[in-house]
Image (cartoon, rainbow, N blue to C red):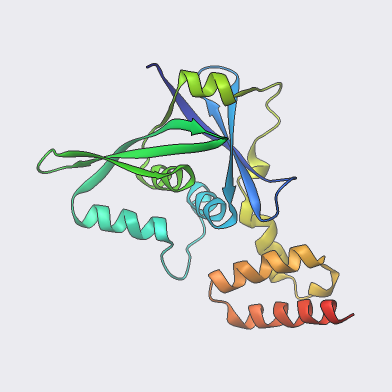
């Protein structure tokens, strides 16, 4: 089957699903785009790796996997989004032991596979038939830099002490982010504000 290489175009918050994001992948040569719904944690991990400026206090899961791979001379050569069943994409990453030359294909959630691909700097592929079935045509190049800063908006609001101006949904997202970053002081403040709103 014919491979099509994909590049990450943007990450957007889903309009239809709470705490979900849409990862947009463009074909490297062409105008089609593959939208994939992913969770908040995976979206954050992908955005952090793309941005390259934020250093989490402790390694994220995908960073840990990269460290393990490096420690045992394992590299990831490519990611393949190989199957689409009932609207769910399935992927695999293709690993190689740099000393023995042994190659292994490992099944993975698409969001995890892409988060790992970014860290290894390896290409992302899908099959032409998947892109033909699930791809959409890009009408303009309007999806650019603004989407990669998934945490940018969150971080700015986290730094702003006036949390009383935020909506309830925003507060809940900030609470999840604070707990993940182990900023328990901020998490406590957000939790109290959410509790206060729910009592009113």
Front residue of 42 and 8: 42
Question: Residue 38 in the image: x percent, y percent?
Answer: 57, 47
31 sits to left or right of 119: right
Q: At x 35% / y 60%, what residue is drawn?
A: 64
Residue 28 visible, this orientation: no
Total residue callouts: 0
Report whether 8 appears left or right of 150: left
Residue in the picture at 82% in, 65% down: 167
Q: Which image quarter is the C terminus in? A: bottom right
Tell me: residue 93, above or below residue 82: below
Image x and y of residue 94, in percent: 29, 37
Would you place residue 26 above or below residue 185 in this image? above
Residue under the image location 82 percent in, 82 percent down: 196
Residue visible at 57% across and 21% down in the picture: 133
Q: Residue furthest front?
A: 86
Residue 155 position, x and y percent, is: 65, 63
Tell me: residue 157, above or below residue 15: below
User: Would residue 155 be seen by someone viewing this image from the given angle?
Assistant: yes
Q: From what the image shows, is residue 13 above or below residue 2?
A: below
The x, y position of residue 60, in whole percent, is 44, 62
Quarter of image, res 72: bottom left
Q: Quadrant of residue 187?
A: bottom right
Depth check, front residue: 146 or 27: 27
Report the front residue among 18 and 8.
Answer: 18
């Amino acid at each position: 089957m014919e491979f099509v290489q994909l590049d990450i175009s943007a990450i957007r918050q889903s309009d239809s699903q709470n705490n979900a994001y849409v990862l947009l992948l463009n074909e490297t040569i062409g105008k089609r785009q593959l939208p994939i719904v992913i969770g908040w944690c995976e979206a954050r991990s992908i955005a952090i790796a793309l941005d390259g400026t934020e250093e989490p206090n402790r390694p994220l899961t995908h960073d840990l996997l990269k460290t393990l791979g490096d420690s045992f001379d394992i590299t990831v050569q490519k990611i393949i989004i190989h199957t689409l069943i009932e609207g769910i994409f399935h992927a695999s990453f293709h690993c190689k032991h740099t000393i023995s030359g042994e190659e292994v294909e490992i099944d993975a959630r698409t969001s995890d596979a892409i988060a790992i691909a970014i860290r290894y700097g390896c290409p992302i592929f899908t099959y032409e038939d998947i892109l033909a079935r699930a791809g959409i045509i890009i009408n303009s190049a309007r999806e650019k830099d603004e989407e990669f800063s998934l945490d940018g908006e969150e971080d700015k609001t986290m730094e702003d002490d006036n949390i009383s101006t935020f909506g309830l949904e925003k507060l809940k997202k900030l609470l999840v982010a604070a707990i993940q970053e182990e900023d328990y002081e901020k998490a406590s403040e957000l939790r109290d504000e959410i509790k206060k709103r729910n009592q009113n």
